[in-house]
Amino acid sequence: MGAQKLCNKKDLVVNSGVCALAQVNGQPQQLAVFYLPDTEQQVFAIHNWDPLGRANVLSRGIVGSIDNELVVASPLYKQHFSLTTGKCLEEDISVPTFAVTLSGDDVLLTA
Amino acid sequence: MAKLKVVVVGNGMVGHHYVETLANSDIDADICVIGGETRPAYDRVHLSEVFDGKAPADLALTTREAYEELGVDAHFGDFVSKIDRDNKQVVTEGGQVFDYDKLVLATGSYPFVPPVPGRERAHCLTYRTIDDLGEIKASAKGKQVGVVVGGGLLGLECANALKNLGLEAHVVEFAPGLMGVQLDEGGSRMLRRKIEALGVKVHTSKATEKIVEGDQHRLRMEFADETSLETDMIVFSAGIRPYDQLARDAGLKVGERGGIEIDYHCKTSDENIFAIGECAVLGNFIFGLVAPGYRMAEAAVLQLSDDKVSFTGADMSTKLKLLGVDVGSVGDSKGMADGALAFVFSDERDEVYKRLNVSPDGKYVLGATLVGDCDDYDTILQYYLNEIELPENPESLILPASDGAAPTLGVDALPMTASICSCHNVTKGDVINAIDNGCMTVAAVKSDTKASTGCGGCAALLKNVVDFELASRGVEVDTSICAHFKYTRQELFTIVQSTQTKTFDQLLASHGQGRGCDICKPAVASILASLWNEHVLASDLVPLQDTNDTFMANMQKDGTYSVVPRVPGGEILPDQLIALGEVAKQFDLYSKITGGQRVDLFGARLNDLPEIWSRLIEAGFETGHAYAKSLRTVKSCVGSTWCRYGVQDSVGQAIDIEHRYKGLRSPHKLKMAVSGCTRECAEAQSKDVGIIATEHGWNLYVCGNGGMKPRHADLFATDLDTATLIKYIDRFLMFYVRTADRLQRTSVWLESLEGGLPYLQDVIINDSLGIADDLERQMQHVIETYQCEWKTALSDDEKLKRFRHFVNSDLADDNVVFVEERGQKRPADLQEKAQKTLKAVS
Ligand code: SRM
Ligand SMILES: Cc1cc2nc3c(=O)[nH]c(=O)nc-3n(C[C@H](O)[C@H](O)[C@H](O)COP(=O)(O)OP(=O)(O)OC[C@H]3O[C@@H](n4cnc5c(N)ncnc54)[C@H](O)[C@@H]3O)c2cc1C
Ligand code: SF4
Ligand code: FES
């Protein structure tokens, strides 16, 4: 399957997240897409569903780093989720991650 | 040479401590321990926790396997019945025989049951072992009333247990007061008041004559004064008696009032036999606490080595919580010594009693009694144990902080021999040693010295000693706000102000590391806002904000938001009420009157927020900052305009004040109120800033708090005219903004402010720091740069671009589902959601 265009670069918010709707294996999925322009990878995506707060809100958390791990803090109860692995730092739980890239002005879901 | 054979009789707390200490020492010995109870040693001190739901197994201090691993030969459930000193053997009831070179008696004690006729009846119980607990529970089942005979420490603990079992609890005491051993009369009286308030019935000066069958309940107690009491069960807790029969039979010397006599080396009259713990008596004194028992065990172990340390007695000071009441007793608690001077503080409203006994020359603490408030216990104990000379006004040690600041004893004043943890006998010297050996945190010192791993009562003191010691060595005690900035919030504030830093990235580059996190980012955003007051959604501030600030609304549990317009002073126009209702109807929002005299509209979707707010702003509303760490509401009462008692216009004052300080970003939220007279209908004394009208002006109160830990505000200044009132509030608020910790309400801030209220008054009223002008200027800047954040945001498309659920679709979040209740919507719960989705599919 080819790459899927999610949105434009200008829809992103620097050092923060937005939520994009994507089709993954024929199903609609909410992706939390983070734009960190000073990292090599630039864009990161994990699922928008906070499994602990049970709401679609992860794109609205604060982005930061904990021991060199890039993380977002859930806006509901503040647990941290890794932007690269989806793993929660406090609880034994993960959220799915998605491969995204910036191609020119387009934000692409590649797999 | 054959190994030394050591036999220990009794596996209670002290016997176990002996076994463990010996097994872990360099002394080469074969250890055998014989315990009469069927289970290995357990924590008797915390026995009553089983009634709070703890499993008996959680009290275990050791296990059979652990003993096996230590190479200890352990036997349980068999009592030693005879000591054969000639052949150096002990014989058990079960017929087992053990040879010894050295014998250690750690048989403890048993509850004393006064010889009252009828005491042998069913449901007359005692309280000392895990097995006793089972009997008490079984007896209480389905019953209503329980009596404890004995109003000492254990009796009261037992009364609490009966209460927890759902019984109406009575305490029957022979003496005129409770806890007569530890407390003086005043303390005992206060304790009684507090305990009775908790629903325990106390009967003092009651001698039980006999126990007979009851009419309404199982038993009836008949007293010498011809009264009687019916109950379903009786627990005797009238003191303890040492288990010394074994020693008596063997011809060992016993004390006049029982107990196996020992010398300073814990030796009995037979030089191969030691006695330790509650069965031992030294100079006619029995030490009925764990800590002295442990010291005896250690001393007795050392007698087998070359290092013959003595046991010369131990401090019997105690601090405990009985039925939730703090009780403390230090040294000569009743002031029995010749010429002792007493200072007594008694507060019948808050039910606090404190007595401090000092030497005739006023220089040293002899003892103390504390009931209802043990905050001063640590300080007094240190003065006592270390014979530290008292300040000139010793009473300041027990007076409430506001009446002349109590000098808490700096840990630097403690000598090296000061005991920090009495459970594990750790001195200040030991702590410092541990730090010398590389322990750099409280946790490391704890695991190295075992300090604070017993009853836990010394945790605060230990932390103080460690922090102080590390700080005095120049080791940074970590007060940094997070891993990204090695500074406190106060330091960051000063840095940002003095370097005129305007962005988080600048600050991170100059003073931090990493990328920041959800702790430092909002904290820095708040500092930047207090100082420069730019719009919350300025592009370089956005990534720093908590979601509530980012969307200028409070996130609810389902990811929707709430909307709270400002209603200054709670005064609202009928047309505004109508507008609120119309907006709520149009966007289907759940409506509720808040505790802050305004209206909250819940369940707004992200994409509706801008539309909702533009309608509200049209109707004359502004943002209410319900989402921000800043001024929330200024509550008011109707005041002199309408109320027959009002002496000033409290509504007008509240409105002015709300307009003045709205939008001020601070370390935590701020709440204020203005009442029109002393009847205080606006509850000003529970606010960060409270104002109460007087005949002559305004009384200003500060640092009150509702919430988790309510605090009454302190009266700060009286009869102020409006201009002075505003000046003081300006200064007060800015001083708080500058010096408080992250998320520290004014109440907690004041509590931690060195010098307390008098210091604060000096800074604000007398300008003792010379910063008053600066504080006022800073406040003026914030006031002048105020903008309604929503209004500004609505005119800027860039700021609004985030207000939609998907950046690439107009669909809504399908996880947001509502159901109806009492005519309004509310978030669906999991089950309701599942049903709704099912319906949609079918
Ligand atoms: C709406 C309201 C309850 C209500 O239905 O009445 C409310 C609702 C919330 N309160 Fe409150 N508090 C409300 C009045 C109060 C009051 C009473 C008052 O202000 O007179 C108190 C006690 C007074 C005080 O603060 O000293 C109060 C003490 C708290 C606390 C505890 C603060 C503390 O110092 O211990 C929190 C938690 C916190 O701030 O960390 C809190 C936090 C919250 C939060 C923000 C929790 C959250 O993070 O989601 C709630 C969400 C509000 C929302 O979504 O709009 N709320 N809260 C009240 C809004 C008042 C307003 O108009 O702004
Ligand atoms: C409910 C309760 C609360 C308490 N609270 C506190 C507190 O807050 N602080 C504090 O410091 N102290 C407290 N104590 C007191 C503390 O528990 C005792 O001081 C401590 O347990 C004494 O230890 P010990 O080993 O000397 O005696 P015990 O713990 O009584 O152990 C003696 C053991 O020896 C056994 N034994 C006796 N005779 C023989 C024999 N002939 N052969 C074999 N075994 C025998 C007994 O069955 C028993 O198991 C409390 C006590 C109770 C009951
Ligand atoms: S506080 Fe005083 S003025 Fe205000 S409503 Fe109450 S009685 Fe009236
Ligand atoms: S005093 Fe009990 S743990 Fe330290």
Image: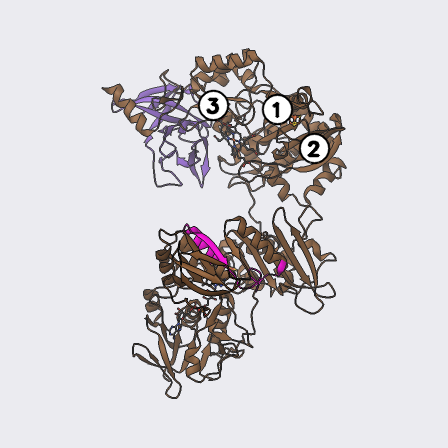
Chain colours: A purple, B brown
Q: Is mark 2 within 8 Å of ligand 3?
A: no
- Assess whether mark 3 and mark 1 are in contact (beta carbons under 8 angstroms): no
Residue drawn where x is 69% and y is 30% of the image: B729
Q: Amino acid at mark 3?
A: Ser
Q: Amino acid at mark 2?
A: Leu
**For mark 2, what is the residue?**
B700
The earlier-in-sequence mark between 1 and 3 is 3
Q: Which residues are magenta?
A: B156-185
**For mark 3, what is the residue?**
B562
Q: Is mark 3 within 8 Å of ligand 1?
A: yes
The earlier-in-sequence mark between 1 and 2 is 1
**For mark 1, what is the residue?**
B662
Query: From the viewer's perspective, is the residue at label 1 or at label 2 nearer?
Result: 2
Q: Are marks 1 and 3 on the same chain?
A: yes
Residue furthest out toward the bottom: B86
Q: Is mark 1 within 8 Å of ligand 1?
A: no
* Kind of element beneath mark 2: strand
Q: Position of residue B651 (x, y in %)?
A: 65, 22
Q: Is residue B174 magenta?
A: yes
